[in-house]
Amino acid sequence: MNDIQALMNKHIRTLTPYSTARDDFKGKAEVLLDANESWFGGSGVNRYPDPRCTELRKKIEDVMSIPFSMSAITNGSDEAIDLLMRIFCAPGDRIVIERPTYGAYRVFADLNNLSVVDVPLKDDYTLDVDKIGAVISGMQPKIIFICSPNNPTGQLYSFESVKAIADMNSGITVIDEAYIDFSGKEGMWRYIYENPRVVVLRTLSKAWALAGARIGIIIASEEIHEAVMKAKPPYNVSELSQRAALSMLDRRDEIESVKEDIIKERKDLSEYFSTLPFISEVFPSDSNFILIRTGDADRLYDYLASKSIIVRNRTSEPLLSGCLRITIGNREENKRLKEALDGYAV
Ligand code: PMP
């Protein structure tokens, strides 16, 4: 047993995974009578999907440069968060998250009966490396989740700060890069070669415009990859989703141009928000959304809703009083948002 395997739950290490019909027979055959599927092809999806998403992972290697051997596909990155907790944590174990951050880490931790230690970000919403360091030495968490760029604050954390935490942590450090494509940075997956306790999460839900298809990507060292393949439900990614992802990854140029558009609109909207007297703070963003602070977030939220514009009200979250999170829409949507805000009477 090596160091990474030692971090896993014993029952995961020794688990004999379900062997699908597709695993048992991998060659080409003309008559498939092994998986109790229907022979009626009217739906186009009468056969089970590839449990290993082989073609999709090859395409991801081509288009996103993520090595085939290091990627595993999940039913959205939300499934990845849950799987990693189940692989590395037992009920009662501790995980560390930041505050504020993506809400699902806590929900999945609660579902898995884990104990959550949340460490506040600094006032400028950067990572408090010293505080997290103290938590690491005091309570040896099984997993630390770092969301970079962070949802809902929007900022990418510095490579040095994330690296410092991952190196101090003798458990697993999960870097959730759902929004990395909007940051102009490559992300941290190459760092896994140096520190194999790091896992990077990506998703095709944001920049790749496939939220409805539910395609998450776990990038991890060989041992973790193996454990994920064992622990995930056999057919976790549907045939329709795999096909949708394959065809979207072929549209890289369009996606690139939409992304450039979003980044340009982000700058434009940030500048516009800064001119509004009722918006006291516009936080810098490396994502496809902007966090703003206003005097009365509920009132502004209700006003926008009355104009048929829905944003995300974060005012009741710790450290986010008065904050709304606003996704960058297309030009027409952003124009409607501006027109509505122009008419807001303070
Ligand atoms: N991580 C972060 C930081 C997110 O904001 C989200 C979605 N809002 C997810 C993960 C989940 O994404 P997916 O659609 O891939 O499940």
Image: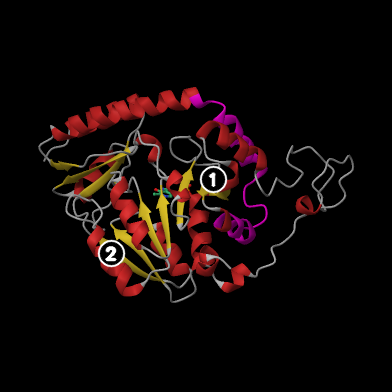
Colour scheme in use: secondary structure
Q: Which residue lies furthest to the bottom in this view?
A: 92
Q: Give the range drawn in magenta.
A: 224-252
Identify residue type, mark 2: Gly
Q: Nearer the viewer, residue 194 or 306?
A: 194
* Left or right of 133 on screen, residue 144: right
Residue 242 falls within the magenta-colored stretch: yes
Q: Which tag, 2 or 1, sits closer to the chain's start?
A: 2
The spot of residue 150 in percent (x, y) is 32, 48
Q: Tell me what residue is drawn at x 16 percent, y 49 percent.
A: 296
**In the rendered image, which residue does mark 1 sit on?**
214
Residue 104 falls within the magenta-colored stretch: no
The spot of residue 145 in percent (x, y) is 38, 58
Q: In which quarter of the image is residue 28?
A: top right
* Left or right of 306 on screen, residue 92: right
Verify CB contact (< 8 Å) between mark 2 and mark 1.
Answer: no
Q: Can residue 310 be seen in this view?
A: yes
Q: Which of 135 and 196 is in front in this view?
A: 196
Label 1: which secondary element: loop
Q: Residue 259 carries which label?
A: none
Q: Tell me what residue is drawn at x 41 percent, y 26 percent.
A: 258
Q: Which of 271 and 24 is in front in this view?
A: 24
**In the rendered image, which residue does mark 2 sit on?**
133
In the rendered image of this protein, does residue 160 appear above or below residue 260?
A: below
In the rendered image of this protein, does residue 143 appear above or below residue 44?
A: below
* Left or right of 27 on screen, residue 114: left
Q: Does the residue tagged 1 have its C-beta within 8 Å of any atom of ligand 1? A: yes
The spot of residue 36 in percent (x, y) is 83, 53
